[in-house]
Amino acid sequence: MSTHPLELASLSVLRFSGADAIAFLQGQVSNDTRRLADGLPLLSAYSSAQGRVVAVLHLLPHSSGVLAILPRELARTTLERLAKFVLRAKVKIEDLSDRYSVAGAHDVSALELASLPAAGAAYVERDGIAVARVADDAQSATPRYWVVRPRENDPAVRGGASDDPADLAWRLADIRAGMPRVYAATSEQFVAQMLNLDLLDAISFTKGCYTGQEIIARTQHLGRIKRRLSRLSLPSGSWSIGQPLRLADGRTGRLTEVARVGEGFEALAVLSLLNATASSDTDTAEGVAVSAEELPLPYRRNAAPPAVTE
């Protein structure tokens, strides 16, 4: 693995600028965007009115506006959906896919070698270059970092196609961190808690209304979380994002991320907590039978839920 930050070609950037940018996002995403004013990058979900996650966003408090990192294939659709709610708000939403690059650094030494500001804090910015610690790695001994920068000032960031080694290595790190990503094939398939976003500090249950909030809060308050994100080891085969599965113990689910490791694969999948016989959840009842090993997540999936404010 290179010691330099490498461009992640599958990812893109949206920018929200203007006097009402943070307030606008507060009414649209699951996390409390007022925390951005404290210089904190935030993990968040943008959901439909039915509470289904359209995109998982990494929000950065950039000096030019709030930057949102998300899969390139969802950038245009997400922008168009959010733009419908701007109305009279003083906010501008831009797709910076061709003007800014997103790179990943797997440790601080990669930042130092590339002469980038080291993010000892959660977020550092210099000359328009943003360096942010990945949300899931806050407690990690070797945290990863986003590097977002204008392309005209990009000599240290290298990359290629979306299936190049840099991108695949980052996706594998996400899998091992239990960090969810939603793609076109899985957009609007899951409520935020099914992606463990409540366990990753990506949902505020006290901030008030936002799109999809009623469903997300009701799911948490009534304890109706029937499916959760799990990490799996899969045998050699043809696996794809969104593919339905049926495990040997009867649980059903759907793949959300997959990466090759040696002769097999590691993956994230949203799985039912009960087997198909004991559960009334038939959303993924038709799935490929697979002999998969469930691997541990770096956080407690059965953590106590945060308090809910109605």
Image (cartoon, helix red, strand yellow):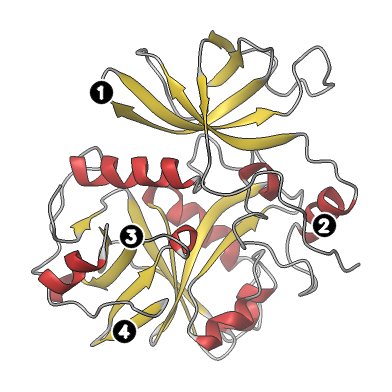
* Residue nearer the viewer, 10 or 234: 234
Where residue 51 sits in the image (x, y, percent)? Answer: 74, 50
* Residue nearer the viewer, 176 or 155: 176
Q: Looking at the image, do the residues carrying marks 4 and 3 touch, with CB atoms under 8 Å apart?
A: no
Question: Which of the 4 image quarters holds residue 248?
Answer: top right
Task: Give the distance between the C-alpha atoms of the residues marked 2 and 3, in whole angstroms.
Answer: 33 Å
Task: Give the distance between the C-alpha atoms of the residues marked 1 and 3, in whole angstroms.
Answer: 23 Å
Q: Looking at the image, do the residues carrying marks 2 and 3 touch, with CB atoms under 8 Å apart?
A: no
Foreground mark, 1 or 3, reads 3
The residue beneath circle 3 is 142
Task: Give the distance between the C-alpha atoms of the residues marked 2 and 4, in whole angstroms.
Answer: 34 Å
Where residue 34 sits in the image (x, y, percent)? Answer: 62, 83
N-terminal label among 2 and 3? 3
Q: Amino acid at mark 1?
A: Gly
The residue beneath circle 4 is 125
Q: Residue at x 13, y 77 (%)?
A: 115
* Secondary element at tag 1: loop
Please indicate, yes or no, whether residue 47 appears anywhere in the rendered image.
yes
Task: Give the distance between the C-alpha atoms of the residues marked 1 and 2, in whole angstroms.
Answer: 41 Å
* Secondary element at tag 3: loop
Q: Amino acid at mark 3?
A: Thr
Q: Residue at x 10, y 67 (%)?
A: 156
Task: Give the distance between the C-alpha atoms of the residues marked 4 and 3, in whole angstroms.
Answer: 20 Å
Task: Give the distance between the C-alpha atoms of the residues marked 1 and 4, in whole angstroms.
Answer: 37 Å
The residue beneath circle 1 is 262
Q: Is residue 142 left or right of residue 200?
A: left
Question: Which of the 4 image quarters holds residue 208?
Answer: bottom right
The residue beneath circle 2 is 217
